Image (cartoon, helix red, strand yellow):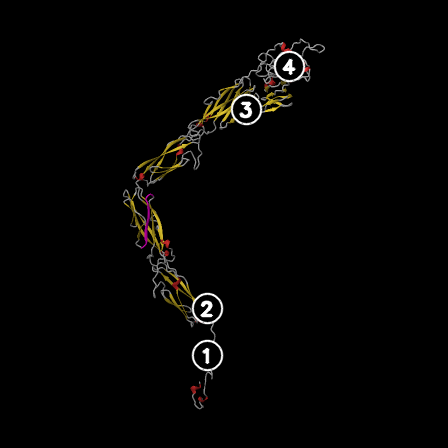
């Protein structure tokens, strides 16, 4: 809290208080003045201040004075107390004129020359020019009423001119003696000494700390992160304020407690550990807490943190300096790396080049796709390196590369990649990743063949006359891989020469297979070893008799020879799945009855014969023929599927239907294809017994139905016993 110096008791004209930051406020009676305020009167102003120690301070026009706590201690710094001198006759004349002016009711501040508040001249004559500043009168006592005859002090008040307590001698009738001695006030010269620093603003900084000593620096040393030092303040006129980096060490002449610390703009910790007012020595320490942002890419350069030091004395003089801390940049250090050996049996190598490097204090945060390593994809002599920013890498050996093949079986080689490690402020270091390469004396392998169930499957049912026609499904495609790390010299598939003497043939190439299908080699990728092919089923095949939907395999030999003469063989197998017939239940649109005794049709018309069809003829076909007796009649079924059913109206079962009754006949038949696969179905026929009317014939004939003659009686005229009936 600021020290209260006094309270304004009287103001004439314009009087201001000027704060340490330069702001001014106009003063009125009752305003307070604090240590550090500059009291300033205008050209026509004057002021009286009642000090906290009970004394009275007055300041004339065009003057200024610094408010310090020394005013309350009855001493003013930088003001020498001159010996009292005997006033000259001219001074006495001036006094008499002043007395006459007051007695006449004039305002001496308006009509007379500058008062004793002015600075003494070099000639020793009291008073000074307007605005000379910093002179004042300190009154020990103040009376509300003053006699018109005024004396002058003969001694200073602790070095400050004051009005005397004594009174002028007077005659009993209160008249002033003409020859009474008068001593005019003398204003001493005030020495003005500047504030200076020793031990600040040095060329390379006062102290140096190094990022390398941080916990994650390249040379960790916690003890070296804090550096201590001192500097000296010279303030002969008395130090009233001192701040270092925003730490107020002295305010209003009062020193703060120690130690005091702040966090600097760059994040370090500045601590003022002590201040010795007798010697002016300030002790401090600076602690580096973390890495700083140095100039990009300039190596172990230095970044200087400037801490401002401001000191002011009781005269209002001030000085500014800087406490400079040099922060040396830490730099990364990349270290050469190696890994295992890449070969045909270990195609990839993984690692992290950062694991043995020294990143230093200016670390770049690591993430999945971020870090201090310059990333990229780099093509080497035998393969490719993918290097990530976080240091992880994957090296992939290219066994098809000409340089790798040139190593031949058992040969060795080396890959070298240079990488760059860069820290957060752009400093970089390079190192090498060295990988070993070995070409194994490898066997040939064929992948994608000899699979259980074959590599491809086609279905007879997809043929145009199959049970489920689907032309695109008749062609099936596939691939297999030849791994001949020592190079392919010869490759044949089912007799098709894919590679001859190391030269790949043109594509596509096709052959007709032994079963009548088509095998086509559509391509060969020498780099990957992939062979592409297709198989097309052109017709049904002769599967084992009556074995259902079985598979018939067709196999094609695959042969490979490498540059070293090693060989490998395999088999490309295609399965041909048998098609089966499908018997579908039949019916007839008509119903057999007394008025339609026969029904005809063909049970084959809605059946599916499948791909293995039996040729139809008058007496040939896939249907098992026969004559079958039913409940109400007889069915005659032919091999080609035609049939005739004859109703027997005399059959007791038919008659049992009675008039209007219905029944049905069901006959099971068998459909068999050319390779013996068979299916059964039912032929169902409807039977109806008509509700017929009764008719009587042979009656009501004209002349009667019979005639007998009496004459034929035994006693008739022409007896004929046989004719009587």
Observer-nearest of 48 and 505: 48
Question: Which residue, as the protein is rendered here, is positioned at the far top?
Answer: 179
**Which residue is at 45% across, 84% downward?**
706
Q: CA distance from mark 3 to mark 1?
A: 151 Å
Question: Is residue 685 visible in the rendered structure shown here?
Answer: no
- The mark that comes first in sequence, 3 or 4, is 4
- Dot 2 alpha-carbon crowd within 10 angstroms: few under 14, some 14 to 19, many 20 or more: some
Residue 163 has which mark?
4
Observer-nearest of 719 and 542: 542
Residue at image mark 1: 697
Kind of element beneath mark 3? strand
Please state the total of marks drawn on the protein image. Answer: 4
Residue at image mark 3: 248
Q: Position of residue 155 (x, y in %)?
A: 62, 12
Q: CA distance from mark 1 to mark 2?
A: 29 Å
Q: Position of residue 305 (x, y in %)?
A: 48, 26
Give the prevailing secondary structure in the magenta stretch.
strand
- The mark that comes first in sequence, 1 or 2, is 2
- The mark that comes first in sequence, 3 or 1, is 3
Q: CA distance from mark 3 to mark 4?
A: 39 Å
Q: CA distance from mark 2 to mark 4?
A: 156 Å
- Dot 4 alpha-carbon crowd within 10 angstroms: few under 14, some 14 to 19, many 20 or more: many
Q: Position of residue 63 (x, y in %)?
A: 60, 19
Rendered view: 77 above or below 585:
above
- Dot 3 alpha-carbon crowd within 10 angstroms: few under 14, some 14 to 19, many 20 or more: some
Q: Check whether the beta carbons of the residues at disc 2 and disc 4 lie within 8 A of each other.
A: no
The magenta region covers 516-527
Observer-nearest of 16 and 236: 16
Q: CA distance from mark 3 to mark 2?
A: 123 Å
Rendered view: 291 above or below 725:
above
**Which residue is at 64% across, 23% downward?**
28
């Amino acid at each position: 809290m600021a020290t209260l110096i006094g309270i304004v008791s009287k103001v004439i004209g314009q009087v201001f208080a000027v704060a340490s930051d330069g702001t001014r406020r106009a003063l009125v009676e009752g305003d307070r003045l604090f240590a550090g305020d500059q009291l300033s009167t205008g050209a026509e102003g004057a002021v009286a201040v009642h000090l906290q120690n009970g004394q009275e301070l007055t300041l004339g026009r065009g003057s200024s004075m610094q408010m310090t706590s020394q005013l309350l201690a009855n001493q003013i710094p930088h003001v020498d107390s001159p010996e009292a001198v005997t006033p000259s006759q001219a001074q006495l004349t001036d006094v008499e004129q002043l007395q006459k002016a007051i007695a006449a009711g004039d305002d001496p501040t308006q009509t007379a020359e500058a008062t004793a508040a002015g600075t003494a001249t070099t000639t020793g004559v009291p008073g000074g020019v307007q605005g000379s500043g910093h002179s004042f009168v300190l009154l020990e006592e103040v009376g509300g009423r003053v006699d018109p005859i005024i004396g002058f002090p003969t001694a200073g008040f602790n070095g400050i001119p004051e009005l005397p307590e004594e009174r002028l001698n007077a005659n009993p009738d209160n008249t002033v003696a003409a020859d009474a001695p008068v001593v005019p006030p003398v204003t001493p010269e005030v020495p003005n000494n500047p504030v200076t620093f020793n031990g600040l603003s040095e060329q390379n900084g006062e102290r140096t700390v190094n990022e390398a000593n941080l916990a994650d620096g390249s040379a960790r040393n916690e003890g070296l992160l804090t550096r201590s030092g001192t500097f000296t303040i010279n303030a002969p006129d008395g130090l009233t304020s001192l701040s270092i980096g925003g730490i107020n060490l002295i305010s209003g002449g009062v020193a703060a407690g120690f130690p005091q610390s702040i966090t600097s703009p760059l994040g370090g910790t500045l601590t003022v550990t002590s201040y010795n007012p007798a010697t002016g020595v300030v002790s401090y320490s600076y602690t580096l807490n973390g890495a700083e942002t140095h100039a990009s890419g300039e190596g172990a350069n230095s970044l200087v943190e400037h801490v401002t030091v401001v000191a002011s004395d009781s005269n209002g003089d001030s000085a500014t300096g800087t406490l400079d801390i040099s922060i040396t940049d830490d730099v990364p250090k990349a270290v050469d790396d190696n890994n295992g050996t890449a070969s045909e049996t270990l195609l990839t190598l993984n690692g992290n080049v950062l694991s043995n490097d020294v990143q230093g204090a200016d670390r770049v945060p690591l993430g999945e796709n971020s870090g201090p390593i310059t990333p990229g994809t780099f093509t080497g002599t035998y393969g490719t390196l993918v290097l990530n920013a976080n240091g992880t890498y994957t090296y992939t050996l290219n066994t098809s590369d000409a340089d790798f093949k040139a190593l031949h079986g058992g040969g060795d080689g080396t890959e070298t990649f240079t990488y760059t490690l860069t820290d957060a402020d752009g400093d970089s270091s390079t190192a090498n990743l060295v990988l070993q390469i070995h070409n194994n004396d490898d066997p040939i392998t064929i992948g994608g063949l000899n699979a259980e169930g074959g590599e491809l499957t086609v279905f007879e049912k997809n043929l145009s006359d199959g049970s489920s026609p689907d032309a695109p499904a008749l062609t099936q495609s596939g691939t297999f891989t030849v791994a001949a790390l020592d190079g392919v010299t010869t490759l044949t598939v089912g007799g098709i020469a894919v590679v001859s003497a190391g030269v790949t043939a043109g594509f596509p190439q096709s052959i007709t297979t032994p079963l009548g299908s088509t095998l086509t080699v559509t391509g060969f990728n020498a780099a990957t070893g992939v062979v592409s092919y297709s198989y097309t089923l052109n017709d049904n095949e002769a599967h084992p008799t009556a074995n259902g939907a079985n598979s018939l395999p067709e196999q094609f030999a695959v042969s490979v020879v490498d540059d070293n003469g090693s060989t490998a063989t395999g088999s490309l197998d295609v399965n041909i799945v048998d098609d089966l017939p499908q018997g579908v239940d039949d019916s007839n649109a008509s119903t057999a009855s007394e008025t339609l005794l026969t029904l005809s049709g063909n049970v084959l018309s809605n059946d599916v014969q499948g791909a293995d069809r039996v040729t139809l003829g008058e007496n040939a076909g896939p249907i098992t023929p026969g004559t079958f007796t039913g409940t109400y009649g007889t069915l005659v079924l032919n091999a080609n599927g035609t049939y005739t059913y004859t109703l027997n109206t005399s059959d007791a079962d038919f008659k049992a239907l009675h008039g209007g009754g219905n029944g049905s006949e069901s006959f099971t038949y068998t459909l068999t294809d050319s390779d013996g696969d068979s299916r059964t179905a039912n032929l169902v026929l409807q039977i109806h017994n008509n509700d017929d009317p009764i008719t009587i014939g042979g009656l009501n004939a004209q002349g009667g139905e019979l005639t007998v003659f009496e004459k034929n009686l035994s006693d008739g005229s022409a007896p004929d016993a046989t004719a009587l009936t």
